[in-house]
Amino acid sequence: MAQVSGQLPTADVDHTYTSTGLNHRKLLMWVFLSSDCLFFGALIATYMVYRGQSLVGPYPIDIIDVPITTISTFVLLCSSFAMVQALAATNRNDQRGIQLWLLATAFLGAIFIGFQVYEFNEFRAHGLKIDTNLFGTTFFTLTGFHGAHVTLGIVWLVALFIVARKGRLGPATALDVEIAGLYWHFVDIVWIVIFTLLYLVGGFDSGPVAAESHALLQSSLTVLPT
């Protein structure tokens, strides 16, 4: 990389690389995503630790609708494909394609959020709130924070769409779209984990497992000779 003195021109700043070989902005995004992995990992671990320990209903099997959530999951995965196409269009300097695919990605993300709002309202109608039981607390906290991440991503995509409308996105600024894509793909991957653990694995839980296990242990102790 050529040595320069004084203030770097804007074009050079976007192509500044760290000792790792990554652009400094991309490296910063990877660091942020790594910290977000720890954040979501803690929330997911908390849900799994308290899974099946709610002493009062409603329980997951009473309200979880796997088919509906499967549709919203498919929509979110389709948005990742749209994000890939947006980056490809940027590298080709396809201005119409950039705008189309960025808007498509944001639109699919908004549909996913719509499904989540519908689900939350249905859960509330069935008596599940964040303070109802352990399931409600851990479920709403985890999925709510994920929904907030998706919403932030939608705002980011809309901002990029506005920039694209002004003709300011292209091969020279493809890094802007790539970094947004890294964030969006991360959000999608996190949802796959959440969907698997909360809906496919834990969505059929019924009753307080911890209380049942305690009762079984007590009954087994009573039959043992003293």
Image (cartoon, helix red, strand yellow):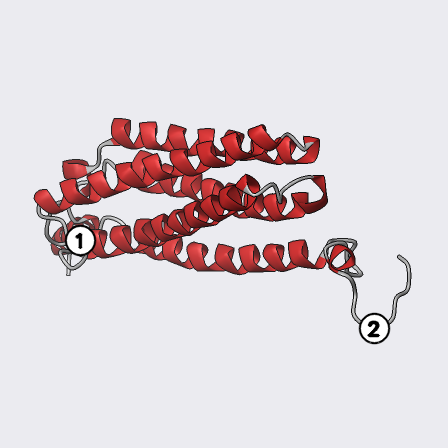
Residue 209 image point, x, y percent: 20, 48
Task: Let me know if residue 202 appears in the view.
Answer: no
In this rendering, position of residue 18 left or right of residue 184: right
Vertical relation: 45 (above or below) 170: below
Q: Quadrant of residue 130?
A: bottom left
Under circle 2, the secondary element is loop
In this rendering, position of residue 47 left or right of residue 59: right
The residue closer to the viewer here, 177 or 23, is 177
Q: Quadrant of residue 206?
A: top left
Which residue in the protein does label 2 denote? 6
Q: Residue furthest front?
A: 166
Q: Which part of the image, by quadrant, shows the C terminus? A: bottom left
Residue at 56% x, 59% y: name it: 32
Which residue in the protein does label 1 denote? 54
Q: Amino acid at mark 1?
A: Ser
Q: Which part of the image, by quadrant, shows the N terminus? A: bottom right
Q: Residues within 10 Å of mark 1 (few under 14, many from 20)?
A: many
The residue closer to the viewer here, 194 or 180, is 180
Residue 19 image point, x, y percent: 80, 61
Vertical relation: 217 (above or below) 157: below
| The label number, if any, that marks residue 39 in the structure image | none
Q: Amino acid at mark 2?
A: Gly
Q: Residue furthest right?
A: 2
Residue 148 image point, x, y percent: 36, 52
Residue at 37% x, 56% y: name it: 43
The residue closer to the viewer here, 85 or 133, is 85
Task: Let me know if residue 79 appears in the view.
Answer: yes
Question: Which comes sooner in the sequence, label 1 or label 2?
Answer: 2
**Distance from the alpha carbon under mark 1 to that under mark 2:** 62 Å
Under circle 1, the secondary element is loop
